[in-house]
Image (spheres, rainbow, N blue to C red):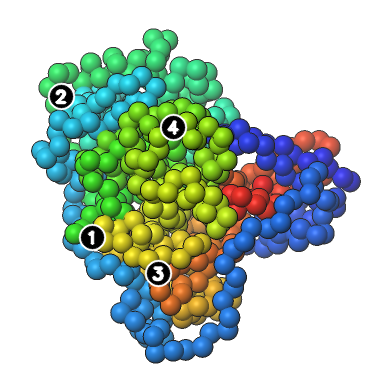
């Protein structure tokens, strides 16, 4: 039988996404049985898409056959016991891993307590660092006093970008509780699954999304009185909040985002206080930080905070250094450029679709965007053509990419052009491995580590990686080996200058506009239809964003 294409829409930008199904069954009657034996069909063996896809993006080619040279045994390439292990060009630094996450973020607050911390782009309201620190403690006390939240309990944040997201996340850290983040555009079924899997006791959300919550949980809304109002929760914490005495272990879980990992359905990724403190420090701490944020910066936060990229590299990194974080609830190109001009934004973390929108916008010349000194791109690769286009529009900005994975905490590598003392970089590179961590490239069939300029699976090891998948030891064992290496499922190589290039993917996962699409989840939904006997979701390459449709 021939099945019609499936049309989906991206939650943030509303761009269409077409998936085409194969004409014949693939002998996989039960999606749950496909683990580790799934073979994606070749694109030319299945129906032609409704559109002719553009030429594939220009990506760094696989390197030529390896030829050993003396230069390859440099200071950041350690050849130990027949293993090639790569480290950052930057020296390791001291990381206060004993601190709970909220204490680490506010460790230097006395130096900038009266400076703007959060700016609500929708209302213009500004919260200082002292305001945010107090609000987080009041919310923590309210969660404990009004809703009975204890250490280890899970709170779901079903929120768009808002100051309340930041207050709530930090409040959970104060209590030793755990935050699981979710996209407000999830369906009621998706929300119910995550609530059940995470055992969330409270959901904090917007009133217009509250009706999606069918589970027996307590609901707090930030904008309506039909449920417990967030403002009442803050009042319940008192003027001078008294928090329960909790002893937080650095290896306690503080964040529980959901990720499909290298294969299968979404799983809870256990990120600890130690892990997130380490990841933030790897980026912004030290005399020569890899990601040079400072307290005079204004960081644009348009990427959704429920995504680990924004949560870590914008919110937590911004709080650590004392920068102002300008919050946008959703992406709209005109509003974005207006806020950049009004607030003199200096740091612009984006994903390729937003970079593309800026590069193509006919209105960009109407705005003064000269304050932007850094454009960070992540969550999906960005090709040279798009890099050149945005450089022409933002000539004052340093442009570079990072590479991350939720399970890695999330940052594996970061562009060294962003360092306080910057390095030269190559177009298409995803940076170099973060410091206080180790990276290796392994041959997938044999597991043997490979030297420079040979492509293989990217693996990372360090204190920043996840503790494991929640209640899924099998998936954890398939992703993290006994030596502590996290296997990403991505194929790449490290060149003679220690820069990482990603060229392929092993894992059963489609990246679309920076979001994860699990084929198994879509296939299970399709197979529920009585007229579909079998289904396989396959990607079609997208030219400009260099991810898949």
Q: CA distance from mark 2 to mark 4?
A: 44 Å
What residue would you read off at disc 2? 241
Considering the numbered disc 1 on the image, is that residue within a helix, a strand or a loop? loop
Q: Residues within 10 Å of mark 4 (few under 14, many from 20)?
A: some
List the single residue furthest toward the front: 365
First in sequence: mark 1 vs mark 3: 1
Of the numbered discs in the image, which one, if any, rests on residue 288?
1
Asked if one can make out residue 45 in the rendered structure from this viewpoint, the answer is yes
Work out whether 467 lies above or below 10: below
**Residue 192 appears at what percent x and percent y?**
53, 31
Considering the numbered disc 2 on the image, is that residue within a helix, a strand or a loop? loop
Q: CA distance from mark 1 to mark 4?
A: 33 Å
Considering the numbered disc 4 on the image, is that residue within a helix, a strand or a loop? loop
| Camera-nearest label, 1 or 2 | 1
What residue would you read off at disc 4? 367
Considering the numbered disc 3 on the image, is that residue within a helix, a strand or a loop? strand
First in sequence: mark 3 vs mark 2: 2
**x 29%, y 46%: residue:** 317
**Residue 512 appears at what percent x and percent y?**
59, 46
List the single residue furthest toward the left: 110
Q: Dots 1 and 2: beta carbons under 8 Å?
A: no
What residue would you read off at disc 3? 439
First in sequence: mark 2 vs mark 4: 2
């Amino acid at each position: 039988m021939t099945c019609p294409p499936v049309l989906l829409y991206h939650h943030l930008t509303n761009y269409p996404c077409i998936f085409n199904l194969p004409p014949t069954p693939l002998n996989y009657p039960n999606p749950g049985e496909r683990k580790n034996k799934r073979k994606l069909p070749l694109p030319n063996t299945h129906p032609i898409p409704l559109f002719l896809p553009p030429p594939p993006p220009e990506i760094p080619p696989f390197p030529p056959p390896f030829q050993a040279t003396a230069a390859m045994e440099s200071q950041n390439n350690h050849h130990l016991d027949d293993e090639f292990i790569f480290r950052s060009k930057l020296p390791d630094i001291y990381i206060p891993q004993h601190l709970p996450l909220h204490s680490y973020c506010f460790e230097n607050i006395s130096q900038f307590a009266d400076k703007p911390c959060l700016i609500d782009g929708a209302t213009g309201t500004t919260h200082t660092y002292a305001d945010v620190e107090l609000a987080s403690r009041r919310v923590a006390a309210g969660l404990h006093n009004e809703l009975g939240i204890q250490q280890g309990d899970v709170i779901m944040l079903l929120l768009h970008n808002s100051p309340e997201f930041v207050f709530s996340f930090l409040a959970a850290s104060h209590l030793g509780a755990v935050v699981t983040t979710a996209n407000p555009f999830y369906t009621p079924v998706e929300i119910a699954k995550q609530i059940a899997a995470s055992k969330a006791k409270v959901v904090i959300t917007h009133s217009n999304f509250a009706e999606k919550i069918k589970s027996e949980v307590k609901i707090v809304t930030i904008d309506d009185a039909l449920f417990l109002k967030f403002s009442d929760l803050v009042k319940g914490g008192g003027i001078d909040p008294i928090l329960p005495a909790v002893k937080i272990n650095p290896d306690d879980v503080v964040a529980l985002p959901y990720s499909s990992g290298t294969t299968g359905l979404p799983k809870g990724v256990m990120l600890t206080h130690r892990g997130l403190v380490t990841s933030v420090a790897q980026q912004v701490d030290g005399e020569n930080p890899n990601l040079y944020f400072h307290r005079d910066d204004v960081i644009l936060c348009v990427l959704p905070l429920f995504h680990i990229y924004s949560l870590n590299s914008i919110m937590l990194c911004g709080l650590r250094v004392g920068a102002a974080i300008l919050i946008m609830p959703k992406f709209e190109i005109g509003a974005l450029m207006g806020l950049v001009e009004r607030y003199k934004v200096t740091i612009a973390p984006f994903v390729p679709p937003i970079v593309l929108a800026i590069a193509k916008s006919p209105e960009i010349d109407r705005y003064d965007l000269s304050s932007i000194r850094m454009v960070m791109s992540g969550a999906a690769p960005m090709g040279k053509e798009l890099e050149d286009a945005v450089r022409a529009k933002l000539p004052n900005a340093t442009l570079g990419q990072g590479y991350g994975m939720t399970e890695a905490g999330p940052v594996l590598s970061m562009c060294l052009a962003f360092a306080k003392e910057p390095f030269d970089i190559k177009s298409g590179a995803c940076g170099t491995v973060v410091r206080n961590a180790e990276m290796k490239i392994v041959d997938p069939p044999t597991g043997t580590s490979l030297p420079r300029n040979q492509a293989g699976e990217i693996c990372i090891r360090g204190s920043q990686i996840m503790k494991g998948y929640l209640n899924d030891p099998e998936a954890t064992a398939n992703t993290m080996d006994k030596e502590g290496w996290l296997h990403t499922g991505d194929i790449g190589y490290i060149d003679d200058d220690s820069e990482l290039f990603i060229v392929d993917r092993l894992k059963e996962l489609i990246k679309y506009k920076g979001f994860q699409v699990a084929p198994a989840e879509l296939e299970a939904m399709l197979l529920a239809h009585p007229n579909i006997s079998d289904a396989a979701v396959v990607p079609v390459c997208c030219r400009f964003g260099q991810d898949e449709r």
